[in-house]
Amino acid sequence: MLSKLKNAPKKTVGTKQTLKAVEKGQAAVVFIAEDAEEHVVAGLKELCRAKGIEIVPVATMKELGEACGIDVGAASAAILNQQ
């Protein structure tokens, strides 16, 4: 599943951008690092559940960051719908 994120033409990286994408109905799948602080990702998890968006757990923030092509960890990311 991370390879899909790596190769996605449109994606968000980071909780703020991912939250905005979910609110606007642009996110197809959301990835959340299991070692991210709960207070950082709690609102995002709740919104995804409310909107019926699939949440894919990723073991570490480092792993998620690498899949997004960045050198730092990421708490969350999303693959965006193709418009």
Image (cartoon, rainbow, N blue to C red):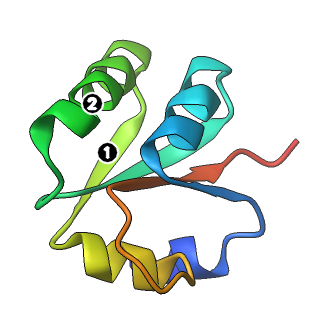
Residue 1 can be seen, yes or no: no
SS class of the residue under badge 2? Answer: helix
Give the percent coordinates (x, y) of residue 13: 55, 58
Q: Which residue bears the numbered disc 2?
A: 45
- Residue 12, how many percent across, how many down? 61, 53
Earlier sequence position, callout 1 versus callout 2: 2
Left or right: 20 as drawn, with respect to 38? right
Q: Nearer the viewer, residue 29 or 69?
A: 69
Residue drawn at x 19%, y 73% as measured from the top left: 60
Tell me if 27 is positioned left or right of 39 in this view.
right
Residue labelled with disc 1: 55
Q: Measured from the top left, where is residue 63 in percent x and y?
A: 30, 82
- Mark 1 to mark 2 CA distance (whole Å): 8 Å
76 relative to 71, above or below: above
Q: Residue at x 51, y 37 (%)?
A: 16
Question: Vertically, is 21 above or below 34?
Answer: above
View extreme (front): residue:
72
Please name the residue shown 26% across and 20% down the image. Answer: 46
Q: Position of residue 74 (x, y in %)?
A: 38, 64
Tell me: 68 left or right of 83. Answer: left
Vertical placement of residue 79 versus 55, above or below: below
Can you tell which of label 1 and label 2 is closer to the viewer? 2
1 and 2 marks in contact (CB < 8 Å) = yes
Q: How busy is the neighbourhood of tag 2: few (under 14 within 10 Å), some, or many (20 plus)?
A: some
Q: State the mark number for residue 68.
A: none
Q: Amino acid at mark 2?
A: Lys
Residue 66 placement, left or right of 60:
right
